[in-house]
């Protein structure tokens, strides 16, 4: 290898980190109910959206995301992942709400305290109609938790009666 080739390769290698920059996370502001997120006006082509938020104390969250557009088959989500570097949870595709939409769900999961990252990847296939998506990660309502607790207590009571 000539010296010019070696110097050119070394110079290019020195600039490689500039090409693969770390993702920029859009901070979300959690409320007592959870966090909401959306993108309006996706450009045509592949996309990855990054979000971050802090969980103050361990809590159970569940989530949903749906796409919408004026044109059928505009936005296609390929993955939605929620992680904190130690734990990782993936949303799963569910039945479409209507033609031209996708619906993704995250089953209830316990999120530990700390910073969490939500990464959404997909492709917008139509140039003339801007694609959109919106979603949420919410803490179950107190009424839902109370109902779940009541059901658990009933199961324990029924089991005790059977054993007696």
Image (cartoon, grey):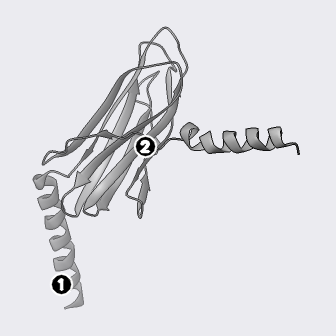
Looking at the image, how many numbered discs can be counted on the residues? Answer: 2
Residue pushed farthest top? 128
> Residue 121 appears at what percent x and percent y?
49, 37
Quadrant in the picture for the N terminus: top right
Q: Secondary structure at mark 2?
A: strand
Neighbour class for label 1 at 10 Å: few (<14), some, many (≥20)? few
Neighbour class for label 2 at 10 Å: few (<14), some, many (≥20)? some
- Image depth: mark 1 or mark 2 in front: 2
Q: Which residue is denoted by mark 2 in the rendering?
A: 119
Specify the label residue 161 is tagged with.
1
Q: Secondary structure at mark 1?
A: helix
Q: Nearer the viewer, residue 36 or 151?
A: 36
The structure residue drawn at horizontal position 41% and vertical position 62%, both measured from the top left corner, is: 87
Residue pushed farthest bottom? 164
User: Please, is residue 81 above or below residue 18 in the view?
Assistant: below
Horizontal side of 12 relative to 68 (left or right) equals: right
> Decide: marks 1, 2 in contact (CB < 8 A)?
no
Q: Quadrant of residue 45?
A: top right
> Residue 39 appears at what percent x and percent y?
35, 27
Q: Quadrant of residue 25?
A: top left
Please tell me which of labels 1 and 2 falls first in the chain. Answer: 2
The structure residue drawn at horizontal position 20% and vertical position 41%, both measured from the top left corner, is: 29
User: Please, is residue 10 above or below residue 115 in the view?
Assistant: above
Quadrant in the picture for the C terminus: bottom left
> Residue 116 appears at what percent x and percent y?
33, 53
User: Please, is residue 135 above or below residue 124 in the view?
Assistant: below
> Residue 137 appears at what percent x and percent y?
28, 45
Q: Nearer the viewer, residue 91 or 151?
A: 91
* CA gap, disc 1 and disc 2: 48 Å
Q: Quadrant of residue 41?
A: top left
């Amino acid at each position: 290898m000539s010296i010019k080739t070696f110097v050119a390769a070394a110079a290019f290698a020195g600039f490689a980190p500039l090409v693969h920059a770390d993702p920029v996370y859009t901070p979300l502001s959690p409320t007592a109910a959870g966090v909401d997120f959306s993108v309006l006006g996706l450009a045509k082509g592949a996309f990855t959206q990054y979000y971050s938020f802090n969980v103050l104390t361990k809590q159970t969250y569940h989530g949903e995301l749906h796409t919408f557009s004026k044109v059928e088959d505009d936005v296609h989500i390929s993955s939605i992942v929620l992680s904190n570097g130690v734990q990782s949870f993936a949303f799963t595709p569910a039945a479409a709400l209507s033609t031209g939409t996708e619906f993704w769900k995250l089953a209830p999961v316990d999120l530990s305290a700390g910073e969490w990252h939500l990464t959404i990847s997909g492709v917008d296939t139509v140039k003339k109609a801007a694609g959109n998506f919106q979603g949420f990660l919410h803490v179950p309502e107190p009424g839902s938790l109370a109902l779940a607790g009541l059901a658990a207590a009933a199961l324990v009571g029924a089991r005790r009666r059977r054993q007696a």
